[in-house]
Every structure is written in C-alpha cells, then in structure tokens.
Image (tube, grey):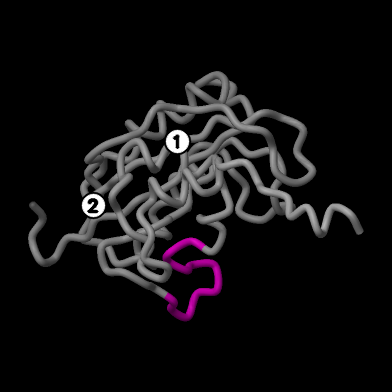
Amino acid sequence: MTSTSEYVYLIALGSNQRHPNMGGPRRIIAHAFDALETADISLFDCSSIISSAPVGPSQRQYANAAAIIISPLSPPELLLQLKSLEAHFGRRQYGQKWRARILDIDIILWSGGVWSGANPALHIPHHHMQSRCFVLQPAAQIAGNWRDPIGGLQIKHLFHRIKRPKRVDPRSAAN
C-alpha cells in the first residue's frame, strides 16, 4: 500500500514510429516500461502490448499499452516528467495532432479522483478515455475494477460497452 504522500496513476502509452536504436513501436513501449522506473516513479503493473488502427491522419499501426505507476508527484509534476521521457525517446513537443510519434504517454486516471488544474493539456480522467478502445483494452487488463470518478463505471465495463456491437433502431433505419 502507498503512503499518504504517494499517488497511484493509470497511464496509457502509444507508439507508431520506429526509433533508430530501439526498433519498432512494440520495442519502444517495452523500453518505455523500463524507463518509467525513476527516483520519482515506480512501475507497479503493465499490460500486454496491443496493436491498434491509427486515429487521425497517421497511416501507421500503433502499439498501445497501459501501466499503473506510483509516484509522490502531483499530476502537473508527473505530466512534466512524462513529457520529458517522451522527448528523451525523440518526440517533438510541438507537432500536428494525431501524427506519427515515437512515444506518447497520457495520464488516464489517478488515485486523487478528478484533476482539472490551470494546464489545459491535463485533465484527469483523460477526456477521450471512454471513447478509445486502444486505451480501455490494455487498461482493463491491469485496472479493470478502477472506476471513472465522473461516470462511476469500472474500466472493464467501459471497455465492454465500447466493444459491444452498436444496435440500430429499426425506426431510424427506415428513414
């Protein structure tokens, strides 16, 4: 169990670009798991690495995973640490949204519940968490019982809801 000065975070990792020294996206995610272990971050658990279709203009398949980390860092402090890790892997800070990237790390949930501070790039729970299967699938493997603090549903239920086939109302199909 963590002390009162430590927080538990659920983070999502993604990659769809090769790194000249590390290799393809799956290898980058594996290296990122190792790189998360720092003086301020402990890796508690990690999901398997899955493949997913690109979102937006990128044409490359993604490798995605999730991790549970423990840290004394506040959400803004952790975000800075994770952005520094992305930069270490070669990600440029400014670029077109949803383009190919070597490493992308997002904070999805944290043990403190909801976070909405002065930084517009940081909202916990992550704004798009509920609509992204590539986030929910690996997250459900390691944090299935963790609840969305806004909607109250568990991660595993959000994942099953997004995977469920959409039902078509026969009345609307006739129009």
Q: Which residue is mark 1?
A: 65
Residue 117 included in the magenta stretch of the image:
yes
Q: Which amino acid does the dot numbered 2 rest on? A: Asp
Towards the viewer: 48 or 32: 48
Query: Percent position (x, y) of residue 45?
Result: 26, 37
Of all residues, the one furthest to the bottom in this rendering is 118
Mark 2 in CB contact with mark 1 (< 8 angstroms):
no
Tell me which label, 2 or 1, sits earlier in the chain. 2
In the image, 50 versus 60, the foreground residue is 50
Sort mark 2 into few (<14), some (14-19) or many (20+) by Cα contacts within 10 Å. Answer: some
Snapshot quadrant of residue 6 = bottom left
- The span from disc 2 to disc 1 (Cα, nearest Å) is 21 Å
Q: Is 114 rendered above or below residue 175?
A: below
The span picked out in magenta is 116-126
Label placed on residue 40: 2
Q: Residue at x 38, y 59 (%)?
A: 153
Residue 111 horizontal/vertical position (percent): 26, 62
Quarter of the rendering containing residue 73 = bottom left
Quarter holding the C terminus is bottom right
Q: Is residue 105 left or right of residue 44?
A: right
